């Protein structure tokens, strides 16, 4: 149950995708999304699909893992598809019955929208599946570094983010443990009406909050006793360094975006 | 002897079908008899905690089954729920599950879930508080402001109040000082004497196991490596050490003395037995 959540999970590996610098991957995801929204016709969509499949293959993330992560989003995807199917006008009419009008343009839009969302999700999932949370926040901090000039507390924000990410698995584990302990005392989390169920959560939430505050306190003491005093002059154990493969990857990303833009101009 | 819990080919795999797949326990067949005090030993990751959580239906086995008093506990939803009251499980660091406003209410949580009458609940709360040495003056205090040892006792009392026929405790003495350890172990033996119930104690302290258990089950890499009387198990010191476990200090001392040529009887694994043996020996060779 709780342990099956795969959104945002990291699957360690040693493929070229895993080894890319997190900054490169973050930029590439932005470029990828931009290209995805520029693509308008079958040919450019096909190109994007091929690129996506190639990246999935190289990263050795099993397609099953990818589709399992998408499960919670099935509703939104279907909803978008259906909406586009019925509310697009233009092209020849295929079906005209009661309030339903399906046109060739509608079918095309629906298919494209669904494919676009699927690729969007795959791209962002690939980022979190192949990059450890720590690397991701480090990369983000360095990318946003210029904002420090206008006094945006980038370091503090990324520190908070990495701590939050760090404690998600811990809290999930803790929730699991407390739930089991209260179940062993006969607590029932699954049945009953809404009010009963809300009340049944009390034996779970109280210990969870107590331990979260205790942990926060302990973490603060541990950080202070190791002389943490903000990002000023702090050095890193893992220095991020751009390698040749990063420049190569960035160049390929730029090339992909350029090709898709050209295709868009020529209506392909 | 009458069997109370039986497992058949119990197997559990965590995160099946992902890169994190791990077989926690594999093909565990064991029978626990009514009234026994069994210590389950094994080092971290040996599968002992996973095994325990199957016995009251918190975890579902991937293969095999668990039978409590002859009934398959996973047969129906009701059976799985009922077994929680028959087999009481005290988790590791149980003080972290305290949540009620007062100690009294917290101990009463389990019995209340059993839908007992108020009078019955009151009687059970008082009885289990007495057995665990939780004074009635603490009843109206918040459990969160007690000391660590007191919290542990309150949490254990909360499970005992359900009067389970089998009481399972996962590392009940972890993180307590020697006096606290002795106190908790005494609470457990007192409970067993007062109610005649079966007790399973998960521990990695060989000294605790030697002190109170009638039978030892040793887990290693998800299977049962040894199962027998304490003297049988502790006589296999070499194997225990190979599994990353040790023997009780008294057994180790007796062994070291034997290695130096001191004639000691076998099966010494508690400090009392060791003392008696050494005293007997000293009397025998008194005129030196």
Image (cartoon, coloured by chain):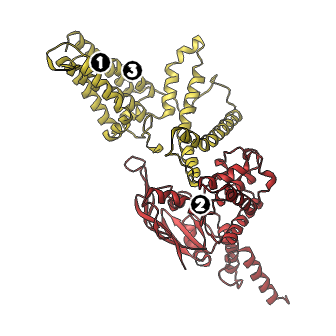
Q: Position of residue A2 (x, y in %)?
A: 47, 43
Q: Which quarter shows the C terminus of chain B?
A: bottom right
Q: Is residue B258 above or below residue B89?
A: below
* Residue under label 3: A30
Q: Earlier in the sequence, mark 3 or mark 1?
A: 3
Q: Quadrant of residue A223?
A: top right
In contact (CB < 8 Å): disc 3 and disc 2: no
* Residue under label 2: B88
Nearer to us: label 3 or label 1: 3
Q: Is residue A251 above or below residue B170?
A: above
SS assignment at label 3 = helix
The subunit letter for the residue under badge 2 reads B
Question: How many neighbours does mark 3 have within 10 angstroms: few (below 14), some (14-19), or many (20 or more)?
Answer: some
Which mark identifies residue A255?
A: 1
Nearer to us: label 3 or label 2: 2
In contact (CB < 8 Å): disc 1 and disc 2: no
How far apart, in angstroms, are the residues tagged by discs 1 and 2? 64 Å
Q: Is residue B170 above or below residue B216?
A: above
Whether residue A148 can be seen here: yes
The subunit letter for the residue under badge 3 reads A
**Chain seen in yellow:** A
Q: Is residue A178 left or right of residue A46?
A: right
**Chain seen in red:** B
Q: Tell me, yes or no, whether dots 3 and 1 are on the same chain.
A: yes
SS assignment at label 2 = strand
């Amino acid at each position: 149950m709780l342990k099956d959540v795969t959104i945002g999970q990291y699957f360690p590996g040693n493929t070229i995708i895993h080894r890319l610098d997190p900054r490169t991957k973050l930029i590439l995801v932005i470029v990828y999304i931009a290209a995805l929204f520029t693509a308008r016709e079958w040919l450019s969509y096909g190109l994007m699909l091929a690129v996506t499949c190639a990246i999935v293959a190289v990263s050795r993330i099993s397609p099953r893992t990818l589709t399992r992560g998408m499960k919670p989003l099935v509703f939104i995807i279907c909803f978008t598809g259906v909406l586009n199917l019925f509310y697009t006008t233009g092209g020849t009419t295929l079906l005209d019955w009661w309030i339903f009008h399906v046109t060739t343009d509608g079918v095309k839009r629906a298919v494209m929208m669904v494919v676009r969302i699927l690729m969007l999700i795959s791209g962002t999932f690939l980022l979190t599946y192949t990059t450890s949370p720590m690397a991701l926040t480090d990369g983000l901090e360095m990318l946003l570094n210029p904002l420090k000039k206008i006094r945006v507390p980038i370091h503090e924000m990324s520190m908070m983010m990495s701590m939050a990410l760090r404690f998600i698995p811990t809290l999930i584990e803790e929730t699991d443990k407390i739930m089991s302990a209260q179940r062993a005392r006969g607590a029932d989390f699954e049945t009953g009406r809404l009010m009963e169920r809300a009340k049944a959560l009390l034996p779970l939430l109280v210990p969870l909050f107590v331990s979260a505050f205790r942990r926060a306190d302990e973490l603060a003491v541990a950080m202070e006793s190791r002389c943490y005093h903000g990002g000023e002059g702090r050095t890193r154990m893992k220095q991020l360094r751009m390698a040749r493969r990063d420049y190569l990857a960035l160049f390929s990303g730029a090339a992909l975006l350029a090709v898709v833009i050209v295709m868009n101009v020529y209506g392909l | 002897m009458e069997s109370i819990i039986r497992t058949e080919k119990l197997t559990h795999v965590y995160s099946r079908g992902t890169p994190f797949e791990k077989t926690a326990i594999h093909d565990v067949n064991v029978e626990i008899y009514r009234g026994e005090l069994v210590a389950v030993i094994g080092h971290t990751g040996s599968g002992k905690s996973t095994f325990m959580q199957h016995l009251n239906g918190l975890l579902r086995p991937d293969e095999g089954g668990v039978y409590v008093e002859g009934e398959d506990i996973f047969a129906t939803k009701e059976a799985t729920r009922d077994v929680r009251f028959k087999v009481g499980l005290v988790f590791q660091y149980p003080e972290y599950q305290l949540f009620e406003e007062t100690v009294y209410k917290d101990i009463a949580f389990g019995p209340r879930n059993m839908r007992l009458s108020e009078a019955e609940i009151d009687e059970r709360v008082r009885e289990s508080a007495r057995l665990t040495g939780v004074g009635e003056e603490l009843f109206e205090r918040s459990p969160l402001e007690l000391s660590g040892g007191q919290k542990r006792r309150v949490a254990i009392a909360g499970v005992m109040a359900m009067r389970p026929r089998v009481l399972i405790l996962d590392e009940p003495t972890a993180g307590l000082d020697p006096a606290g350890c002795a106190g908790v172990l005494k609470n457990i033996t007192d409970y067993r004497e007062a109610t005649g119930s079966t007790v399973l104690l998960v521990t990695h302290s060989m000294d605790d196991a030697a002190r109170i258990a009638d039978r030892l089950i040793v887990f290693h890499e998800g299977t049962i490596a040894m199962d027998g009387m304490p003297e049988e198990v502790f006589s296999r010191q070499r194997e225990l050490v190979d599994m990353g476990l040790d023997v009780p200090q008294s057994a180790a001392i007796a062994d070291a003395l034997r290695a130096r040529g001191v004639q000691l009887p076998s099966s010494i694994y508690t400090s009392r037995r060791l003392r008696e043996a050494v005293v007997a020996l000293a009397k025998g060779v008194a005129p030196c």
